[in-house]
Amino acid sequence: MPGSIEPLDLCDVQVPYYFRCPISLELMRDPVTVSTGQTYDRTSIESWAATGNTTCPVTRAPLSDFTLIPNHTLRRLIQDWCVANRAFGIERIPTPKQPAEPGMVRSLLNQASTVSNPFSVRHSALVRLKGLARESEKNRNVICSHEAREILMRILFSDVSSGSSELSQEALAVLVMFQLTESECTGIGSDSNRVVYLSELLFHSSIEVRVNSASLIETVLAGMRSSDLRAEICNVDEIFAGVTDILKNLSSYPRALRIGVRALFALCLLKQTRHKAVQAGAAETLIDRLTDLDKCDAERALATIELLCRIPSGCSAFASHALTVPLLVKTILRISDRATEYAAGALMALCSESEQSQKDAVSAGVLTQLLLLVQSDCTDRAKRKAQMLLKLLRDSWPEDSIGNSDDFACSEIVPF
């Protein structure tokens, strides 16, 4: 390392130049050595290689291979230096978890997929693969590069007799951590036996298995272009019942809520089977869980509510829930532009079908919310929905509100 590099100031403490990455000039957190003998921070040298560079940044010599060897000695020296300078606000760098070795991943996949292996060996291999996949995206990429998805699907949908059902569930737990290709989604969605099996897992005694099954169903629905195949999946009544039950009874599990909302939204995108969601109790469950969701999940839930409000049975189910209209009114301008747009759309559908919903909306203060929405920076679609809803509710406004709304009376109502 050239001695001319000026020491880096970190919390008013000079960092020795040999602790700094030659690429980023920052304190190394995971020093690794390349084939030329030079040491770099792992993140920096991986980014260097990912952009197509094939030479060592310092020596400019060609890299014979891109094997990165952890420099444990230097990392421990850096950690000791951090501890020695903690009085100056320097935090000790954590010991990094090493990425999965391709050879080990190949071995684990081979152990898991070999039918003649004992159950304990196959199960242990799948558990280790699950742990590696959970650690980092880097590990998931390594695992994926060895045709893992094909192997995992083969284990998942193999004969699930008494000896292999647990293997199937472990394979499912690993598989849901990866993105599937369209052909892989089609391969699952076009096989009725596979779809039925996943629907059965939605009622498994294990919460993890139920949520993983819902996750894979959502992935398959989102990954297929064929509306006919999506319709075949959505025609399985147990899927709507299982996904709705996850939302209804597993609300204390954040992942269950998130996956349940995503799966229900994917199922409700197909208009001809939305009535199945209503029959499964999705309308009541969505309203009951709406306040438990974070921003992204609330947006999906509101989008699903708007979709279900487009069918008569959905409108009736939501209108019969006392909290539907007040919650939708409260949502306007509270969560996000998208959430506001979906809430306004759902209110428009409900108020178009029910005078009681109109009265409930006015009582909940929708007039003020809609006037604010029209004047906000929200999306044009949300504003158009607000304008049409204001026009629809005009006969329901209190007299004092009408007297103060002359300015809006001249506004142009833009149709959808």
Image: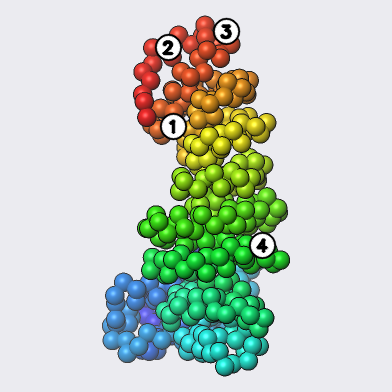
C-alpha span from label 2 to label 3 = 14 Å
**Disc nearest the viewer among 4 and 2:** 4
Looking at the image, residue 132 lies above or below residue 340: below
The residue that appears at 53% across and 34% down in the rendered structure is: 312
Report the residue marked by disc 3: 400
Mark 1 surroundings: few (<14), some (14-19) or many (≥20) residues within 10 A? many
Q: Amino acid at mark 2?
A: Ala
Instruction: Say whether disc 4 or disc 2 marks the residue closer to the N-terminus.
Output: 4
Q: Locate residue 412, reporting x and y percent.
A: 36, 18
Look at the numbered discs 3 and 4 and tell me whether their residues touch, using CB distance below 8 Å.
no
Q: Locate residue 10, reporting x and y percent.
A: 52, 65
Q: Locate residue 114, reporting x and y percent.
A: 53, 90
Report the residue marked by disc 1: 382
C-alpha span from label 4 to label 2 = 54 Å
Left or right, 394 with reference to 210: left
Q: Is residue 47 or residue 160 the one in the foreground? A: 160
Report the residue marked by disc 2: 409
Left or right, 124 with reference to 223: right
